[in-house]
Image (cartoon, grey):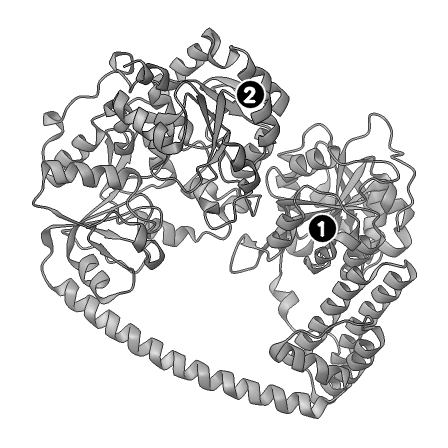
Amino acid sequence: MSTHEGDTAMPNAPQLSVIVHGRNVQGHLGACLDGLTAQVSPGVEVIVAAVGASAQAAAAGRTGVTVVPLPEGTGDGAARAAGAERAAGRWLHFVHSKDSVPTGAPRAVADRTADLPEGVDGVDVLVVDHVRSTWRHQGMPSPDGKHLAKQGRRDLPLRDCPNLLKVTPLLGTRVLRADFWRAHRDELAVDDETFAAYAALLLAGRVAALDQVALNVRELRTESLPTGRPEERYGVIDRYESLLRLATGLALPTAPRAALYDVMVGDCLRIVAREQLPDPVRREFFHRASKAAAAWRPKGHQHPGGLEGVRRRLLEEDAYTKYRTFQTANQQRRKLRSAVVSRKHKVGLKVRDLRYRRALDRPVDPDLAVFTAYWDRGVACNPAAIAAKLAELAPHIHPVWVVSAANVPLLPPGTDHIVPGTPRYWEVMARAKYLVNNVNFPNAIVKRPDAIHLQTHHGTPLKRMGLDQLDYPAASKGLNFHSLLARVDKWDYSVSANGHSTEMWERAYPSNYTSLDYGYPRNDVFYSATAADIRAIREKLGIAPGKRAILYAPTHRDYEAAWTPRLDLATLADRLGEDTVLLVRGHYFYGGAASPLAGLRKSGRVIDVSSYDPVEELALAADALITDYSSIMFDYANLDRPIVIYADDWETYATTRGVYFDLMAEAPGKVARTQDELTELLTSDAWRDETAAKARRAFRLRFCEYDDGRAAERVVRRVFLGESEDSLPPVTPVDERTPAPTPEEATQR
């Protein structure tokens, strides 16, 4: 394992060297370098180990790129070694010339490595995530996120994180400390990338993870076609045996050796079952894999249960004929089951399609409106506020809510609802005059010419949305933009809270809908709520009179698979004292995850409100808001109460997700980049001083432009009652509005 004594890089050396290596495969090197040179920043250098004249021409003349020319025929291992020899960085990220690096990844990797410990107990390997692109699809997510998320921000020896051996074996997802590379160059500078990727983990003293996409692997169509002699597949077994021999020689404990063994057996069984091999070759491969499985099985290692366990026993017994019989029987069973399911599915689809088509042939019901929010979660957000105002102004229109079966018990009593896929669902969806959603309806829903689709959205966009995600594959994660535009083309109206949103929606979702610059209906309550309402909400939450309540509401990050508070909440609560209560709300994308806050709730000073609805009540209850990049800041600003931005990873978020404006320059209040800075702001009066108020006023003028408490009324009168634009209530200017009372004011009334 690693025995480095410390970092031997020069004091002014870059933090990260991105080493692009190989031939100019199918002309992809130019695009790779275009993306890299467009985002080079201090602390990151780009080295190109260019193999052959074409690669050298593609790399030549680029500012900030060091080219290492190599002769045609140089292998990947030698190219990596040549590039690393020229590199000056403390860490090395190897990228094949056909692949690319997503926007923001080099900076994020450099920042993460800078935080890692050095010295004898330092980290040698940082494991990152990747996406895959083929000739058909772009930016398909990998299966590795769950392993990286489990590792979190800990750095551990491999014995304590053996599941990292299950991460896809790509050397480009292993960022290596330069000293570690030099110490183990003989094992790592090989043409077999899979071997090098596994060997890097086996040799590392400690390993860390970054649950962020830092590599876009281009899978060429030619790579999926059969090449070489079938007998070459025997090399897979040789590779795994070499790796297990290495692990044994390093005296690694049982856990990582068992994990590597499971990977070997699974890979060998996959080859036997799925690859097109002549039967004699398949039989010999099975025999060799059997010998390896029996020889390297760790003492006491248990087989998995079920069919997989049967397969492994047959492999270890070298029972090829039995295995093939078992495999054939399984295939026949699967085919039969699939045929039965397929017939049922086809019959079901035919019945559904027939029922839906018949319903579509019937007239639209002018007094029927469908509402849904957040992918059928229930009564919430702008659709809920519009439905409430509709009941007041147009009670003859009957509302029906689309809600998932799991959320039906959470509906308000008496709510008429439909569950997706049921017969009544298709009937109602076909005949409703009005369809209201804060996301999109499924592709299968037909847009009838005389039906009206109202898109309300669910926030003001800071992050890039829609077509503006095209350049951010880590954020779009395989989004089908053609299907997206087909859904957008069904919109008749798009609700907007401010001019910024109107402009961004029309750019991100270009189509022929009408923008309704009326404000967000869900924010009407910030002007209509009374002191009694606020007292009742705080009492329901368990906030004692006189206590300062701070709402902490961070947003979802595309480069994190699971939500964990970015603040040490226990320490923050202690520093803020007995008179402050923290209301902590995780993003709804993580609604199914177990809360990491359970241990903090006993004190009563940290309240987990992640599942509390509606979120508008939390805003009304809070004296101040702490957030990072969540759109809640735009809504909360309507209350004209202090907002503090906690932006510990702004650069990573901005470059990875893409943003529409620089929040650091146009924040709604004070900005903290560390927990210490945040604590200092909140333990002094800085969080609500004149500077903070001035910033908040500028923010409100821009982003609370149309929110004046009458948004829902304007929407209902225009869309449902057909009134003209001129007859609607004009928007009250920001400086002439009176928001709901603060909690302090509410206790005095």
**Residue at the image point whose x is 41% and y is 16% from the top:** 696
x and y percentages locating residue 376 in the rendered image: 32, 51
Q: Is residue 109 above or below residue 449?
A: above
Residue denoted by label 2: 576
Location of residue 483 (image quadrant): bottom left
Q: Is residue 336 above or below residue 649?
A: below
Q: Which mark is residue 172?
A: 1
Circle 1 residues within 10 Å: few <14, some 14–19, many ≥20: many
User: Looking at the image, is mark 1 or mark 2 nearer the viewer?
Assistant: 2
x and y percentages locating residue 573 in the rendered image: 56, 26
Q: Would you say the residues marked 1 and 2 are in contact, meaning their CB atoms lie under 8 Å apart?
A: no
Type of amino acid under label 1: Gly
Residue 581 versus residue 520: which sits nearer the camera? 581
Type of amino acid under label 2: Leu
- Which element is circle 2 on? helix
Q: Is residue 363 left or right of residue 418?
A: left
Res. 503 visible in picture? no
Location of residue 74 (image quadrant): bottom right
Residue 90 versus residue 389: which sits nearer the camera? 389
Residue 623 versus residue 686: which sits nearer the camera? 623
**Residue at the image point whose x is 46% and y is 86% from the top:** 336
Q: Is residue 116 left or right of residue 444?
A: right
Q: Residue furthest top?
A: 690
Q: Which mark is residue 528?
A: none
x and y percentages locating residue 344 in the rendered image: 34, 79
- Find the distance from the CA under tag 1 to the CA under tag 2: 44 Å
Res. 323 visible in picture? yes
Q: Is residue 530 left or right of residue 643?
A: left
The quarter of the image holding the C terminus is: top left
Q: Is residue 11 left or right of residue 572?
A: right
N-terminal label among 1 and 2: 1
